[in-house]
Amino acid sequence: MDELLQEFLNETAENLETADNELVKFERDPDDMEALATIFRLVHTVKGSCGFIGLPRLERVAHAAETLLGKVRDGEIVVDAAIVTATLDAIDRVRSITAGLAQTETEPEGDDTALIERLEGLAAEDRAAQDDKAGNGSAACAPPEPASTDPSEDQDPPALGRSGAAQTIRVSVDLLEELMTSVSELVLTRNQLMQERRREDAADLALPIDRLSAQIGRLQESVMRTRMQPISGAWNILPRMVRTLAVDLGKRIDLVMEGGDTELDRQMLELIKDPLAHMVRNSADHGLEAPAERAAAGKRETGTISLSATQEGGHITITLADDGRGINTHRLREKAVASGVMTAAEAKAAGEPQLCRLIFHPGMSTAEAVTNVSGRGVGMDVVRANVEKIGGAIEVDSTPGQGTRFKLRIPLTLAIMPALIVGVGEARFAVPQIAVAELVRTGEGSEHRIEHVAGAPVLRLRGRLLPLASLSTALYGDAAEDAEIPPTAADHVLVIRSAGLHFGIIVDRIYDTEELVVKPVSRTLSDLPLYSGNAILGDGNVIMILDMNGIAADLADVAGEDPANDDKAAAPEDGRDAMLVFRAGRDVQPFAVPLSLVTRIEDLDAAAVERAGGGYVVQLRERLVPLVGMDEAWSPAETGRQIALVFSDLHDTVALAVDEVVDIVDAAVSLEISSSDPARLGTAIIAGKATDLIDVAYLLRRRSDREGDMLYSARPTPGSIKADILVVDDSPFFRNMLKPLLDSAGYTVTTAAGVDEALAMRESGKRVDLILSDIEMPGKSGLDFARAVRGGGAWAKVPMVALSSLAGEDDMDAGIAAGFDRYVAKFDRERLLTLLATSLKDRAA
Amino acid sequence: MTHSATQIVTLSLAGRALGIDVMQVQDVIRLGTVTPVPRAAPWIAGVMNLRGHIVTAIDLRARLGLPPTIGERSMCVVVSLDGEAHGLIVDAVGEVLAVSEADREPDPPTLPAHWRAVSRGIVRREEDLILELDAAALLSGCPDAQIVAAA
């Protein structure tokens, strides 16, 4: 489109809106010469511009309106309703022509003769006629033909409700959402940086990071604010609407608006626009009396509708009041009984407030006659439904003869929360999706199942144990099974990661996800920590929203310990490893093994253990698995249960018979390698006790009888190749175990606790000959690391060996695909050394 | 109606005639679906949807230590206190009664303590006596202890 034309259209759209409101203001106060001057100037500008770009139809209309307004300004004629109506019609016509222009870039076809004649006729009338007219209120409304009778009107496309073109630009909501997402990401990154800043001696970075942080904070706020708009955006249409209504109804109405600058979410603004307009229309139609009736009641002839908005906390309160006749509760009562909304007795018992609220019932309009303004069946019930749909509330109070006041409370933003609807027995509860990190199916036929350690339910999840709690127990207590609540199906585990918590909640069913409009619980329920709110579901029922923090705290009270935050938590903190502590054989001293190395814990029937060759085997998941004890001389019990820890590597699986799993402890392990027993790595202090760490690789090899294995025998002389090896592992235990091992083999070892730390070394120019990396690491995984290394940079060609407790074929393939050259089970020290030597040899060759 | 007269809505609960000040009554509805709230006090029946608003339903029988109803179609008197609505589940709702001061009597000293705690006094009628409930007292205080005392 022609730039000039576009500019004209934008400017005109803005001018027209101003003109609308100024005109209404001017009519109310004909002495407001400033308002008149503004209107005149606006119309004049339109006329001037059209002449300039050559828009004859527009120019003629604007000219006629300007002439009329000019006479008013010069005091030649006195303003009256007819003049204002005609001018408003002219503005409407200009608006519809410009709308056509915006679409086709040419003036649409149409006949403006009638309108122009009306404008010219009014301009030509002498003062005497005007005075006469002004004295007669109803006559003032008569001459102006309603705009719809004008033949050209129907041919024009509807006017565009443009507003505020100059200082603003249109941005799609999608783009705003995208901005919001990016800002959230930025905030996350900023927070990471802030943590780094605290930890490292990064004095040089402190200042820029602080500046960045402050800037991101401001950015976040601004982006949030882009969604907020002043409520006047929903009000701008009202003055004009009320004026039209007053003319149509033969009433005199003042519209007073306060607090138009109160801001709320733009989506909310759109949603309340129509209900609000409808309510104002209702007040004008039903609420306010005709001037004669008002005069008879000793009131001012001009009725007042006042609209105000204030912000209170997370809500906006919009008050709409009129000083009209009030709600006729007698009629409501009759109507309620007649339409069956209430029985006669109920109607009789109903108090005044309850009767007033009947206007929110369908089909309870109290208009004496159906007018073309309201009372068309779209009543306050629709308004109420719309308000409630957006989480708002509407109240009414009314005093007969003095007026009616509506109070609308709506949230600042649509407080919509995506939630997971879960089931326990017959009951349903909502869990905020934000608190659910993961959903694990544990029912029949799924690969995960709930296990027990010393009676406590746990779930093995990616090599870590997740403490579990049953929602049924949390809600109904341990007596659940005795009560009417049927035994739980325990089909799903919600992995909760919220506010520093990490635990699983066992539920029976997952129904659905639903976007809930959250409402606070009532005072009588507010001291229950289990709920963060409640909401009305799509099906109309109320659902309680669970507060996962509250549930965790509550479970801790019941169990005497915090299931998520105590030192038994399976997800270790930095510098700690989850160690499984058990007793076995005749040893008084407990044993321990890193939990990440345990494939499963099996509870076996002792009778299922069979003798085979020189040892014992047991059938586990359709495979015969060797069952060994800590002592060579171990033999299984004849009857009862036998607990076994199952360890697997790529080739072999072995079950270690233990007497008892004592505990799972999150501990910083410092290993003393001083053991003479090959089945033990050494001793460490765990949970205050000297504990022997078992050598899983030795156990596996001892039974699988592969001492003569090619790889094993081809083990190179330690130190035959000098090399710098980088070990990347989040577990300090393994770093501590590997470093001395590799040191003693003659390698130079550097360790990194994570991918980022390792990559930082690469950036700083560190040279390495081989990289040994763990796969399962919090944050960036070993696979990410391999891809980053292979993606370019100084280490792109450095051999990489994956170290993992996961050792299935799939895992291997994934590792190779990501860029690893070789794969070795984490605990297999012998094979590790062999592989290192082979890899380095390959590289040298 | 004299100036000092008030109006009460009469209720019936386990054969007892009770009343509640009309000014405290926001609504009278037939009881719909109530969602139970685990771990709430035993006299809280649950939460329900009252035309888009969530209202806590009070099991008035449990609250007053009366035997539970079975299967009866119950009514719910919605009372509004400090801007918050609660639904009182009762057996039936009667009529609105204009009560003059002359019809009123204080609680008899023999009235059990857990009743006295929620009573505004007694209203005399030809046919019966009505205990007027105090909605605010019903929703506060330490009802659990009272129920124990009543049991």
Image (cartoon, coloured by chain):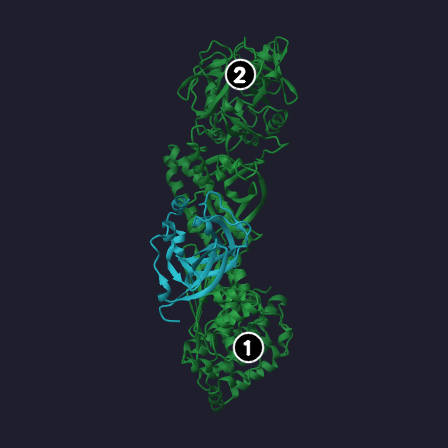
Chain colours: A green, B cyan
In the depicted view, which residue is nearer to us: A380 or B81? B81
**Residue located at (45% from left, 82% from top):** A73
Whether A444 is drawn above or below B114: the answer is: above
The tag on residue A829 is 2
Question: Label 1 neighbourhood size at 10 Å, few (<14), some (14-19), many (20+)?
Answer: many
Spatial CA span between label 2 and label 1: 91 Å
Extreme-bottom residue of the structure: A128
Q: Position of residue A34 (x, y in %)?
A: 41, 76
Residue A554: image tag: none
Neighbourhood count class around disc 2 (C-alpha, 10 Å): few under 14, some 14–19, many 20 upward: some
Does residue A277 appear in the picture of this structure? no
**Foreground pick, B23 / A592:** B23
Q: Is residue A837 above or below residue A539?
A: above
Place residue B16 in its image quadrant: bottom left
Disc number for residue A90: 1
Q: Amino acid at mark 1?
A: Ala
Left or right of A590? Residue A617 is right
- Residue A744 x, y percent position in the rendering: 47, 13
Q: Nearer the viewer, residue B32 or A374?
A: B32
Comparing marks 2 and 1, which lies closer to the viewer?
2
Q: Earlier in the sequence, mark 2 or mark 1?
A: 1
Whether tag 2 and tag 1 are in contact, CB under 8 A, the answer is: no
